[in-house]
């Protein structure tokens, strides 16, 4: 037995045999800039002796796959915070497994520093698409950190490693929280959700940003709380020439959806308020 972390006794590495779908925790290999913002929630497992176990695929999308991962210190009861936690791993597809593309409307104004990387992306070579996948992962991780620090309801971003983001899993017992689009909600609950979405829009806009792909599919409802996900295309509304258009599209997407479900609202007035926030 040996010590890892502050106060846990865990089996020495040699005593643990990794099974299929397991790896050593990738936490110790990350640098401080690849880790989520401080103060870290107490459930984040930082022990070097922890093991990551893949529990399954939650969703397989065009550009990324979402896996459920358990990160736990072997032999620990898991009753104390920081010994075991369930995480969502969002893995961006690289050229071996996808056609990766997103509209350049989002990336205008975003700079790729290394000219070799930029040329490769422009050529859409296999290397270029790997760079692009890493950039989307980096953009999403950065956006999650930014939003978390502003107090917006996003999953806590635990770490980024290449094209994989590990974040708080929003759900219970391995079952992901429903998306707003499919959440079984009564009318008064819908009104409560609408108010939270409006607060989310204000939170982004007052930081001069728009989500850029806001819809009832990128909002989860967990215990009555709305959590916003899927942020790689976050837009700087002032710096991006399409910024206000994308902000307006976010507003219309959600307002139309709520209107159809009997929650009256005024998208023009809301958009005007958000523009005022952005110019604050
Ligand atoms: N942190 C999370 N916790 C629980 N479920 C999540 C989480 N992040 C994503 N999901 C689920 O995975 C789906 C895909 O994730 P998303 O980030 O929207 O990727 P994309 O739409 O680009 O495939 C979401 O619709 C949601 O159902
Ligand atoms: Mg999505």
Image (tube, rainbow, N blue to C red):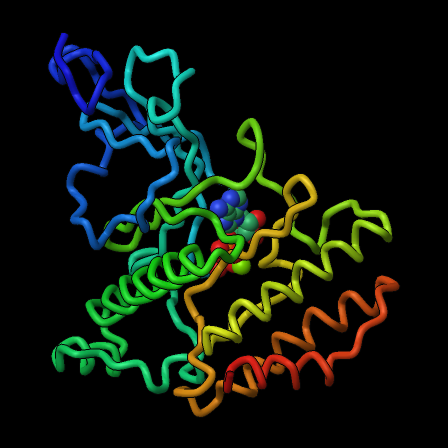
Left or right of 215? Residue 22 is: left
Q: Residue at x 17, y 75 (%)?
A: 117
Q: Residue at x 16, y 49 (%)?
A: 31
Q: Position of residue 16 (x, y in %)?
A: 20, 14
Q: Residue at x 14, y 7 (%)?
A: 1
> Residue farthest to the front?
280
> Residue farthest to the bottom?
241
Name above or below for residue 96 compared with residue 20. below
Q: Position of residue 233 (x, y in %)?
A: 44, 71
Seen from the viewer's position, the closer of residues 62 and 243 is 243
Seen from the viewer's position, the closer of residues 97 and 68 is 68
Residue 215 visible in rendering: yes
- In the figure, residue 108 lies in which quadrant? bottom left
Q: Position of residue 57 (x, y in %)?
A: 47, 39
Left or right of 20? Residue 274 is: right
- In the figure, residue 216 lies in which quadrant? bottom right
Seen from the viewer's position, the closer of residues 12 and 197 is 197
- In the figure, residue 105 lies in which quadrant? bottom left
Name above or below for residue 229 compared with residue 257. above
Q: Residue at x 58, y 59 (%)?
A: 218
Q: Position of residue 161 (x, y in %)?
A: 24, 50
> Residue farthest to the top?
1
Numbered-mark total: 0
Left or right of 81? Residue 22 is: left
Residue 59 visible in rendering: no
Left or right of 208? Residue 129 is: left
Name above or below for residue 46 compared with residue 40. above
């Amino acid at each position: 037995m040996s010590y890892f972390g502050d106060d846990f006794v865990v089996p020495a590495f040699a005593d643990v045999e990794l099974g299929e779908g397991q790896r050593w925790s990738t936490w110790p290999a990350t640098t401080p800039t690849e880790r989520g913002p401080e103060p870290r929630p107490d459930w984040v497992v930082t022990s070097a002796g922890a093991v990551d176990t893949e529990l399954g695929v939650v969703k397989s999308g065009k550009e990324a796959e979402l896996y459920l991962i358990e990160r736990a210190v072997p032999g620990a009861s898991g009753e104390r915070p920081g010994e075991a936690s369930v995480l969502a791993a969002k893995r961006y597809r690289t050229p071996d497994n996808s056609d990766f593309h997103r509209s350049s409307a989002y990336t205008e104004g975003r700079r790729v520093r290394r000219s070799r990387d930029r040329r490769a992306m422009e050529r859409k070579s296999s290397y270029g698409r790997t760079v692009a996948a890493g950039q989307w992962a980096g953009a999403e991780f950065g956006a999650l950190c930014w939003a978390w620090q502003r107090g917006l309801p996003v999953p806590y971003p635990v770490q980024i490693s290449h094209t994989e983001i590990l974040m708080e899993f929003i759900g219970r017992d391995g079952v992901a929280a429903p998306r707003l689009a499919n959440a079984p909600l009564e009318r008064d609950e819908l009104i409560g959700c609408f108010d939270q979405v409006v607060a989310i829009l204000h939170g982004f806009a007052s930081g001069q940003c728009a989500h850029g792909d806001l819809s009832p599919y990128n909002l989860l409802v967990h215990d009555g709380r709305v959590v916003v996900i899927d942020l790689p295309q976050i837009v700087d509304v002032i710096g991006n020439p399409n910024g206000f258009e994308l902000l307006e599209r976010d507003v219309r997407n959600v307002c139309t959806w709520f209107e159809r479900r009997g929650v009256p609202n005024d998208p023009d007035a809301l958009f005007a308020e958000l523009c005022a926030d952005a110019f604050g």
